[in-house]
Image (cartoon, rainbow, N blue to C red):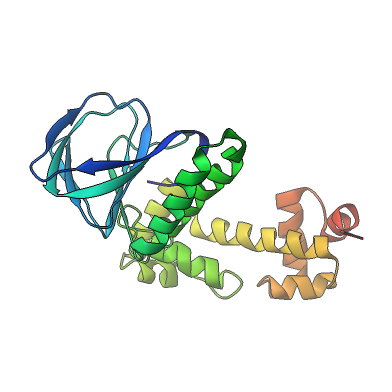
Amino acid sequence: MNFDNVVITDILNVVTIFSAKGRIEKMNNRMCSGLSFTDEGQITYVHNGKAFVSDRNHAVILPKGQSYVIYGNKDGKFPVINFECENLSSDTITVLPIENIDIVMRNFEQMKKLFILKSNRLAVMSMLYNIFDIFLRSGNFTSNPLAPAMKYAENNYCGNVTNALLSKQCNLSEEYFRKLFKKTYGMSPKQYILNMRINKAKQMLSEGVLKINAVSEECGFTNPYHFCRFFKQRTGLTPSEFMKQNKIYKI
């Protein structure tokens, strides 16, 4: 599942549900998307013949419109956040690894308190995004085999990032990695890295501290001419024109 374009449009409720060992229950046509996790219990969800486990180390995203069977493996309290969103394209349950459940639980308890007042809507939305971010930054996001490469790219995009290096992070062949990346993100790894560099350049040009040659070098372009050419292709403006239009002169 790719979360890059997911937009949360509403949070319907923020509750804690007790699930007992031995519980068997069927959910028919779930009315909204849901996120659930726990710090002590265990539930197995069976959907389309596959089992998905939620426990101290694994949260689950429950997709809207789907039906599944719930089996209680171990007593526990399960925080549940029910929400509406756009661009959550998966039609199956997604398991998210949890590296530190205590941090997640603290965020949830604060979110639960804030949810009581409608005036806190923006803060509550922000906290849900933050919880998702905690999950997605976990080292082994099982639902996205490209996650290690994305993390590497995020930290090294201004350096010499090659398909060979990125595919190695995921233990995938270079050819398969390139095809999977294009299918997932709609562009080649090279184009993705280039977009990151251009976005960094736009930020630096807006700050107006460094000259264009220095910005080019900082953003990983070895040749300022190539930087200017790529920048204009992406933005429709030369770096000089962009700086003139967007430079922040005062706070």
Q: Is residue 87 above or below residue 171?
A: above
Q: Is residue 198 above or below residue 14?
A: below
Q: Is residue 139 above or below residue 7?
A: below
Which residue is at 46% across, 55% downward? 107
Q: How many marks?
A: 0
Q: Residue 29: where, in percent of width, then height?
A: 27, 24
Which residue is at 50% across, 37% downward? 116
Q: Which quadrant is home to the C terminus?
A: bottom right
Q: Residue 113: where, in percent of width, then height?
A: 48, 45
Residue placed most toward the observer, 195 or 87: 87
Look at the image and tell me whether residue 187 can be seen.
Answer: no
Q: Is residue 247 above or below residue 212?
A: above
Which residue is at 27% across, 60% downward? 57
Q: Is residue 245 left or right of residue 222?
A: right
Residue placed most toward the observer, 31 or 90: 31
Which residue is at 31% across, 64% downward? 172
Q: Is residue 4 left or right of residue 69?
A: right
Q: Residue 218: where, in percent of width, then height?
A: 71, 74
Displayed quadrant of residue 238: bottom right
Residue placed most toward the observer, 54 or 207: 54
Q: Residue 242: where, in percent of width, then height?
A: 84, 55
Q: Is residue 105 left or right of residue 240?
A: left
Displayed quadrant of residue 98: bottom left
